[in-house]
Amino acid sequence: MSIVRNRLTAAILVLVIFGFTVRAFAYPAEVSDISGKKYFPAVLEAIGRAEQSINVAMFTVESSVARENSKPNQLIGALIEAKKRGAEVEVVLDQNVDFVGTVLSWETKIKSTRAYKRLKDAGIKVYYDEPARYTHAKCVIIDKQIVILGSTNWTESAFDNSIETDVLVNSPGLAEEMLSYLKTIKLDEAVDAYLDSTGPAVTLEREFLENPALGPRLVKEQDQRAFDVYLYLLWTYSKENRGSLQKEGTGSILTLFYDTLAQHLGIYDGWTDTDYRRQIIKVLRKLEKKYKLIKFEPRYAKEATITLLEEAPRPIGSPGVPSPAETVPAYFNLPNDYFDFGWNRKLSLRAKFCLLINLANTEISDTKPFWSRSVANLARQFGGVGEDVIHKGMQELRREKLIEVSYDELGGKPYDKRSPKRYKLLPFYDPRERALALAEIEGKYGTQAYRTARALAEVVFEENNPAVVEDIIAKCAEYGEKEVR
């Protein structure tokens, strides 16, 4: 193996620690120092030479979206190539459990999710450990003979900036012992269900959010009706029942039913068909002429024909839309619950845009279900929308209990040294059921107590949480409103 190394060919004592004390065994071995910048090329070469098997246990694997050819991505790619050559590849990743601030609770933080998805999509056996225990190992075992271990995670920072110590050990005896130990890691069988829990969804292109001429322009011009109609058209196209769809070279064609769109927009009841058709046609003309997102063909006394233009972002499955690159997800999912539960009519335009930002960033987050970015960076990334749009949109989502927001502790640090806010996307719920639950509380305790409790809950963004509102009513009754306030 062409690796620059210090070679010790002797019987040596190798003590491996995975967070626990284990017995020490002496094995005949050939040991190479691959610390620091020697680690990456050594591991890449070793994986490239694998013939039969590769077993990996890794605390953190970073799959960069921005840098397709990053060193972690190269190692992931090498594992995939080894699988294609016929080697058995198995990877175990760690998921953390974090203690949450002043609230006495624990939260699972699933990291390395992009690497997990890429490996899984390639047919590799990849798993997460159980959340209650750390898999702090950084270990690679190749062909039941080569053992690579040390302190290096598969991250760009570890490869290029950190001081790390690692060794490559050629020892079948050690490899056998390590493989037996790795088999003791308990796996979380529910991870896939958690990561895929969004249900049916329309898949959108990130470009719609990031291109200043597309979604951001609709937000800046406060054109909510056009925003809503365009998302509706994408949703209609993405539905499983595509009986009314056709394909041709200019784009993706669908038949638009005015009555259905009017109901979706909330302009059906109390409107004449002439009135709501006039409103819809006006918006469709704007999407065609001003924003150049569709081609609109009205037909006298018939439903309209809509073409989603090829030069505009369209859902996966549209003719001419390539599949996303393996390491650069150009798409994200908007769950059908957004439409089915009527959030398209309940949220403001800025909140809808921020909801899409949350969905897009959660999709690429390496610490699901969390993601973090500064407001200034979000405003720049997503088409130059104002920071005020991000602030107020996120606040509205928080009040509606669609996201949670946590903050870095100051701890004596200057304000400008704080880490960005951390966001967590929450599952969609039916706001009508939430309204009924709140109305039931009002009926049970009276309007005055209910309004007081909701006003107090509003201070901590919990006025739409029935459990919190009812708890505040109980606290006011026990301690008095002044003390609770």
Image (cartoon, grey):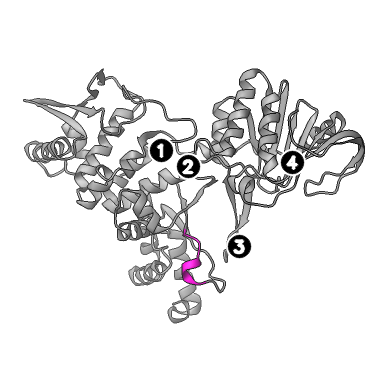
Q: How far apart are marks 4 and 3 (CA)?
A: 43 Å
213 horizontally vs 105: left or right: left
Question: Compared to 61, does 471 lie above or below?
Answer: below
Question: Compared to 51, does 422 lie above or below?
Answer: below
Q: Name the residue under label 3.
A: 104
**Mark closest to the chain's N terminus, 1 or 3:** 3
Q: Which residue is drawn at 39% across and 63% down?
A: 463
The x and y percentages for residue 189 are: 63, 36
* Callout 2: SS: helix
Q: What residue type is labelled 1?
A: Phe
Q: Residue at x 45, y 30 (%)?
A: 325
Q: Do the residues labelled 1 and 2 touch (CB within 8 Å)?
A: yes
In front of the other: label 3 or label 2? 2
Q: Distance between the residues labelled 4 and 2?
A: 31 Å
Q: Are marks 1 and 3 in contact (CB under 8 Å)?
A: no
Q: Give the range drawn in magenta.
A: 414-421
Q: Mark 2 points at which residue?
A: 364
Q: Mark 4 points at which residue?
A: 34
Q: Name the residue under label 1.
A: 332
Answer yes or no: is residue 75 visible.
yes
